[in-house]
Image (cartoon, rainbow, N blue to C red):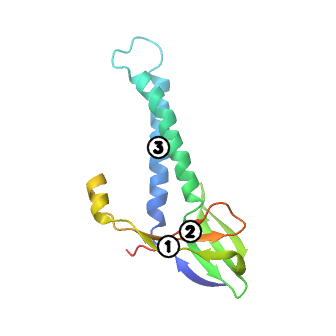
């Protein structure tokens, strides 16, 4: 199989995964370590509220990892898609006839600057496979 796409930005996604799970573990530890006793700062209550919220964000990131394409390999009849997984990578092979590509999309850098304070100019495309419910995400932003 011939490699037709390689994503160089996958480390950023992996870093976000680690940050979300570290935050979830930190809030869970804070909720456990401040239990009982008289806590005038309400750290225990805050940690109990924030833990499931951060865990939900971490699970959403896990879902995103499985859609984020890190490499594409093509042969005359099929395409092999490589994505991130919780630990390591996973790959799947599909017939070329089952694949369709969406148009390239782009974020509006001015809108993201106003919303986040950062100038983000990202581009991506989707790759739909007939046998899958969710489309793959192909990051086409150049470093």
- Which of the pair 136/13 is nearer the observer? 136
Q: Measured from the top left, where is residue 68 in percent x and y?
A: 55, 64
Q: Which mark is residue 69?
A: 2
Q: Are marks 1 and 2 in contact (CB under 8 Å)?
A: yes
Task: Provide the secondary structure element on which disc 2 rests.
Answer: strand
In screen coordinates, is 15 left or right of 95? left
Q: Nearer the viewer, mark 1 or mark 3?
A: 1
Percent position (x, y) of residue 34?
44, 21
Q: Please indicate whether residue 80 sits to the left or right of residue 54 in the image.
A: right
Circle 1 is placed at which residue position?
A: 7
Q: Quadrant of the N terminus?
A: bottom right
Q: What residue is drawn where x is 60% and y is 58%?
A: 85
Mark linked to residue 34: none
Position of 74 compared to 53: left or right? right
In this orientation, which residue lies closer to the viewer: 60 or 105?
105
Q: Which residue is mark 3?
A: 22
Q: How far separated are the C-alphas under marks 2 and 3? A: 24 Å
Local secondary structure at mark 1: loop
Vertical relation: 127 (above or below) 28: below
Are circles 1 and 3 on residues that touch, CB within 8 Å?
Answer: no
């Amino acid at each position: 199989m011939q490699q037709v796409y390689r994503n160089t930005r996958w480390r950023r996604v992996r870093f976000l995964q680690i940050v979300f799970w570290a935050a979830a573990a930190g809030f869970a530890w804070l909720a456990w370590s401040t239990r009982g006793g008289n806590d005038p700062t309400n750290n225990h209550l805050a940690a109990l509220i924030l833990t499931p919220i951060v865990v939900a964000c971490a699970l959403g990131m896990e879902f995103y990892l499985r859609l984020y394409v890190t490499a594409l390999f093509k042969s005359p009849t099929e395409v092999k898609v490589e994505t991130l997984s919780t630990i390591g990578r996973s790959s799947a092979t599909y017939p070329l006839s089952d694949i369709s590509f969406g148009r390239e999309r782009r974020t509006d850098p001015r809108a993201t600057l106003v919303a986040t304070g950062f100038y983000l100019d990202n581009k991506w495309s989707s790759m739909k496979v007939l046998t899958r419910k969710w489309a793959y995400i192909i990051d086409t932003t150049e470093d």
